[in-house]
Structures are given as structure tokens and as C-alpha cells.
């Protein structure tokens, strides 16, 4: 990991210290989507190293989350603090294609990897599955607890499985074919089938990020206290992997991911690989988001700087043949 270098830096002036979310489309891992609480959505091209567009949507003063549609990378969605979910074509970003109004605040959204459906997590232990073709709610998920559902992640390999995490540290695995009851409620102290049910939450604080590995056989939760824990979606058991990053301020969001097969975490102004004990700095302020791209990865921090990271042997050095003679 030490051979990664910052290939390009882009100053996201429109964010104005109001960054709320980042996503990279999964087809080409090229286009970077980010949103701000001041109502601006933008896309950056990691190939041409240029901004594609910046758009402010009237009537939606504050954005909560953004997500590329996995089924069609030309479509993205954003949610607002008014309970609205909007679907937009990146080819015509000035126009909202479809709109869904929810009865609770939407905290996070995420598209299924194989189908044109989206999960929206909400207050009071609820989440909705929405079909964007008809812009209707297909079904409702209920944890039977009153905590706000903060985070979500679809399985990377099974179109029916998804995981949600709430503000009290509880995390659940659901199958959308039977949404009335979760399959597992994850308990950190339950690492074998013989372990007693302690009825303890998976984390001691709000779960702000959940992500699967590429095979879909492991998933990881990230808490507000900066604790990262590993789980088996097959058994619902802890796999007894735990890593730590920094404690985060309340309502701060981050996104972690696998880079070259290893977990990459934001840690202060750096990217940290805990399994390798490698840290590389690249920001002036705290890093918030780390996601893979086609040639490396992208990081975005509270300094509003978007870093495009490539391996040093992949960075093209351009010779300067300018005539500097008098």
C-alpha cells in the first residue's frame, strides 16, 4: 500500500464544509458522486480528472445521502432531510426523473447490486424497499425497536440479503423475501453456535457504516466510537476481528472499504490499513470517505479535497518539452 501516491487533487469548493456522502459507480469505477448538506450534488470523472457537473436542487435545501444505481450507472439517487428521495439521470442532472415521499426522515439510502430497488433507512426502527421503476414502496422492514436506522448495505452476491444498523448499535440481517422478521441480530459476544445469547448490541454506539467484502462472505460494521467489527452473514456470528480508528463526532459519517483486498479506514488525516499496520497521509483534515476506483481509490475529507490515488507505477509522468531558451 505504500506505493500508492496522490495522482490528482480536486478542491470541492461547493461543499463549504458540508460534506454528507460519497459514492463511486460500480460498472467502470470511474465516476465519483458526492453530496452536501447545503443541497449541492456533484459528479467528478476520475479518468479525465475533471468535474462533470454541480447541481443544486430547489426545494431540497439539505441532502442526507447519495447513491449510484448499481443496475444502471447512469442513474443516481439522493435523499433529503424532508423525507424525500429523488432519482436523477447523470446525463440530464438538472431534471428529477422520479420522486418518492417518505413519512419519516431518511437517514441513508443504498441500491441493490442486481435489481433496480433501493433501501431507505428511517426513524422508529423502520426501513423501506423502493422500486424506482414505478417510484413505489415495495415493502417495509421493522426492527421492532424505536431506534433510528442509520446505515445499510446490500450483499454483494445475494440480491435478497441486506444488513441495517441503528443508532443504539444493533445490527440486523434481513431477507427481502421474508421482511417481517430479521434472520439474525448480530451479537459481538456470540462467536459460535454454542455461545449463549447475551442480547447485547453488535456495537456500543451508533453504527454509521456497514460494508461487505467482495465475496459477500464477510461484513463489517463501523461505530461512532471508531470500532470496526467483522461478522459472518452466513451464520450471524462474530468472526472475532476488531480494528479501531478514531472516535467520531455525533452524526459524523464515514465510509470504509476494501482496497486491494484489505480493509482501509479513515484515521485522522490519513488512510489506515489495520491488517497491514500501514498508514499514508494525504489530507489536511480528517478523512471521511475511502472508496475503490478502477486504478486505485478515492478519498474525501473535511478539507473538501478529493484525492485520486493510483499506484506510483501507474502514474504517467509527462515530459516537459517547452522551449525555455531566450
Image (spheres, rainbow, N blue to C red):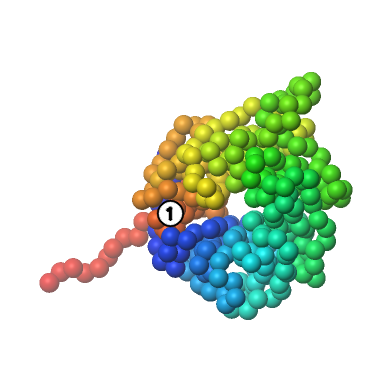
Q: Position of residue 88 (x, y in %)?
A: 65, 72
**Residue 12 appears in the figure:** no
Residue 123 in the image: above or below residue 234? below
Q: Residue 120, located in which quarter of the rendered image?
A: bottom right
The residue carrying pointer 1 sits among few (fewer than 14), some (14 to 19) or many (20 or more) residues within 10 Å by Cα, namely some
**Residue 91 appears in the figure:** yes
- Which residue occupies 77% across, 26% down? 197
Q: Quadrant of the C terminus?
A: bottom left
- Which residue occupies 64% across, 73% down? 89
Q: Position of residue 119 (x, y in %)?
A: 73, 56
- Which residue occupies 60% across, 60% down? 65
Q: Which residue is mark 1?
A: 302
Q: Position of residue 181 (x, y in %)?
A: 84, 44
Residue 260 in the image: above or below residue 54? above
- Which residue occupies 67% across, 45% down? 166
Nearest the eye: 26 or 233: 233
Where disc 1 sits, the SS reads loop
Residue 212 in the image: above or below residue 39? above
Amino acid at each position: 500500500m505504500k506505493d500508492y501516491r496522490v495522482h490528482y487533487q480536486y478542491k470541492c469548493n461547493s461543499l463549504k464544509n458540508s460534506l454528507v456522502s460519497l459514492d463511486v459507480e460500480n460498472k467502470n469505477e470511474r465516476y465519483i458522486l458526492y453530496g452536501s448538506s447545503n443541497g449541492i450534488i456533484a459528479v467528478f470523472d476520475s479518468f479525465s480528472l475533471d468535474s462533470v457537473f454541480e447541481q443544486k436542487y430547489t426545494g431540497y435545501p439539505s441532502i442526507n445521502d447519495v447513491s449510484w444505481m448499481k443496475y444502471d450507472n447512469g442513474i443516481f439517487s439522493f435523499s433529503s432531510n424532508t423525507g424525500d428521495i429523488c432519482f436523477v439521470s447523470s446525463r440530464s442532472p438538472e431534471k428529477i426523473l422520479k420522486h418518492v415521499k417518505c413519512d419519516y426522515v431518511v437517514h441513508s439510502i443504498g441500491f441493490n447490486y442486481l435489481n433496480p430497488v433501493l433501501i431507505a433507512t428511517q426513524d422508529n426502527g423502520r426501513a423501506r424497499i423502493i422500486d424506482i421503476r414505478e417510484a413505489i414502496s415495495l415493502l417495509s422492514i421493522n426492527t421492532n425497536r424505536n431506534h433510528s436506522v442509520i446505515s445499510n448495505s446490500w450483499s454483494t452476491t445475494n440480491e435478497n440479503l441486506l444488513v441495517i444498523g441503528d443508532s443504539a448499535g444493533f445490527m440486523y440481517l434481513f431477507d427481502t423475501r421474508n421482511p417481517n422478521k430479521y434472520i439474525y441480530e448480530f451479537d459481538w459476544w456470540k462467536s459460535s453456535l454454542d455461545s449463549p445469547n447475551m442480547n447485547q448490541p453488535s456495537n456500543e454506539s451508533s453504527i454509521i457504516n456497514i460494508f461487505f467484502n467482495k465475496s459477500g462472505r464477510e461484513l463489517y460494521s463501523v461505530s461512532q466510537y471508531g470500532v470496526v467489527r467483522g461478522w459472518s452473514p452466513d451464520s450471524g456470528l462474530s468472526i472475532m476481528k476488531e480494528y479501531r480508528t478514531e472516535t467520531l463526532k455525533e452524526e459524523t459519517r464515514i465510509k470504509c472499504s476494501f482496497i486491494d483486498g484489505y480493509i482501509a479506514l479513515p484515521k485522522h488525516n490519513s488512510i489506515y490499513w489495520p491488517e497491514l499496520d500501514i498508514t499514508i497521509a494525504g489530507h489536511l483534515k480528517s478523512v471521511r470517505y475511502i472508496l475503490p476506483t478502477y486504478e486505485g481509490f478515492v478519498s474525501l475529507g473535511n478539507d473538501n479535497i478529493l484525492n485520486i490515488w493510483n499506484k506510483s507505477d501507474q502514474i504517467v509522468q509527462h515530459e516537459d518539452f517547452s522551449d525555455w531558451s531566450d
